[in-house]
Image (spheres, rainbow, N blue to C red):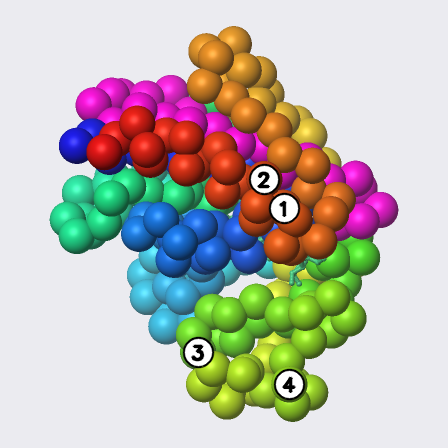
């Protein structure tokens, strides 16, 4: 059975992390979030974390070679999983080309979660996350049961430094300049889908699941 790589694309705050976690659980996929991996390196104060901290806090992209190395390692792991869902990679056309070279045998399916800009600003300003287990919340759209505490592990929820208003506008600018061309890279290859991300988490999940199920059935 060949293992597929599902790439979730979308502006910052489109819901990639939220949906990737659910898809991974539903379809036995390994969830690889370059953003989450980099944030945990920053928290742990590793050499890599020290190199990328300021770049991430400013909303810029980390150098390609560093994230490509992360992806290279991840794609060699998880032998018990049926495939991968990538969230945050590729971020530019160079990264997308790299992914083609390492996942030839697997096949890449790109899905863009399409969300309007005013909506992502609402989502990012209210986002909180658990620094201990990574669970994502929103103070209005998906609040924790006890305010400020993770439902699963009880840790205190925090706001990401790059969710400050001035950094969000820089991240959106970087997205338009560097990541938007990746949509065309995949649509010109024919392995590209779009879902309307302006709907509820459950409705977006349903749209994504329909696409993934089609390919997973083919793999059986
Ligand atoms: P990364 O962590 O990848 O950030 P991002 O792409 O900006 O995306 P986000 O994590 O902000 O949003 P999301 O789409 O996952 O939305 P979420 O599900 O959380 O990258 C961070 C940084 O790392 C980058 O700026 C860069 O520096 C570096 N980096 C990472 N990868 C890199 C790479 N490949 N190359 C170079 N640098 C890289 O949802 C957002 C909020 O909305 C949440 O509160 C959620 O609860 C809520 N929500 C989600 N869906 C819905 C819905 N349908 N309705 C209502 N609320 C919703």
Q: CA distance from mark 1 to mark 2?
A: 5 Å
Quarter of the figure with the C terminus: top left
Q: Which of the 4 quarters of the picture holds residue 97?
A: top left
- Give coordinates of residue 210: x percent, y percent: 50, 37
- Mark 3 Cα shell of 10 Å, populated few (<14), some (14-19), many (≥20): some
Q: Which of the 4 quarters of the picture holds residue 7?
A: top left
Q: Point out the tag, 1 or 3, that comes first from the N-terminus.
A: 3
Check the image and report above or below for 154 versus 86: below
Mark 1 lies on a secondary structure that is helix
Q: Point out the tag, 1 or 4, that comes first from the N-terminus.
A: 4
- Give coordinates of residue 142: x percent, y percent: 68, 69
- Mark 1 Cα shell of 10 Å, populated few (<14), some (14-19), many (≥20): some
Residue to which mark 4 is pinned? 145
Check the image and report above or below for 38 versus 112: below
Q: Nearer the viewer, mark 2 or mark 4?
A: 2
Residue to which mark 2 is pinned? 207
Residue to which mark 1 is pinned? 204
Q: Are marks 1 and 2 in contact (CB under 8 Å)?
A: yes
Q: Are marks 1 and 4 in contact (CB under 8 Å)?
A: no
Quarter of the figure with the N terminus: top left
Q: CA distance from mark 1 to mark 4?
A: 23 Å
Does residue 99 appear to the left or right of 72 in the view shown?
right
Nearer to the camera, 170 or 7 = 7
Does residue 121 appear to the left or right of 20 in the view shown?
right
Mark drawn on residue 132: 3
Residue range (magenta): 95-120
The residue drawn where x is 17% and y is 43% is: 76
């Amino acid at each position: 059975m060949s293992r597929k790589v599902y790439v979730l694309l979308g502006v910052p705050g489109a819901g990639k992390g939220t949906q990737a976690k659910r898809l991974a659980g539903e379809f036995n996929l390994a969830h690889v979030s370059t953003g989450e991996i980099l944030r945990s390196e920053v928290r742990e104060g590793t050499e890599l974390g020290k190199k990328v901290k300021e770049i991430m806090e400013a909303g810029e992209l980390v150098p390609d070679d560093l994230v490509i190395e992360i992806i290279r390692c991840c794609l060699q792991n998880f032998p018990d999983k049926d495939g991968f869902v990538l969230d945050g990679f590729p971020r530019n056309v160079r990264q997308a080309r790299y992914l083609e070279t390492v996942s030839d045998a697997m096949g890449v399916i790109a899905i863009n979660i399409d969300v309007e800009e005013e909506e992502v600003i609402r989502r990012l300003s209210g986002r909180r996350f658990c620094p201990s287990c990574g669970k994502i919340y929103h103070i209005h759209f998906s609040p924790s049961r006890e305010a400020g505490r993770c439902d699963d592990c009880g840790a205190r929820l925090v706001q990401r430094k790059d969710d400050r208003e001035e950094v969000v506008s820089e991240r959106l600018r970087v997205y338009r300049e560097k990541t938007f061309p990746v949509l065309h890279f995949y649509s010109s290859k024919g392995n590209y889908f779009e879902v309307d991300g302006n709907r509820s988490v459950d409705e977006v999940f349903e749209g994504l699941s329909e696409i993934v199920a089609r390919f997973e059935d083919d793999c059986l």
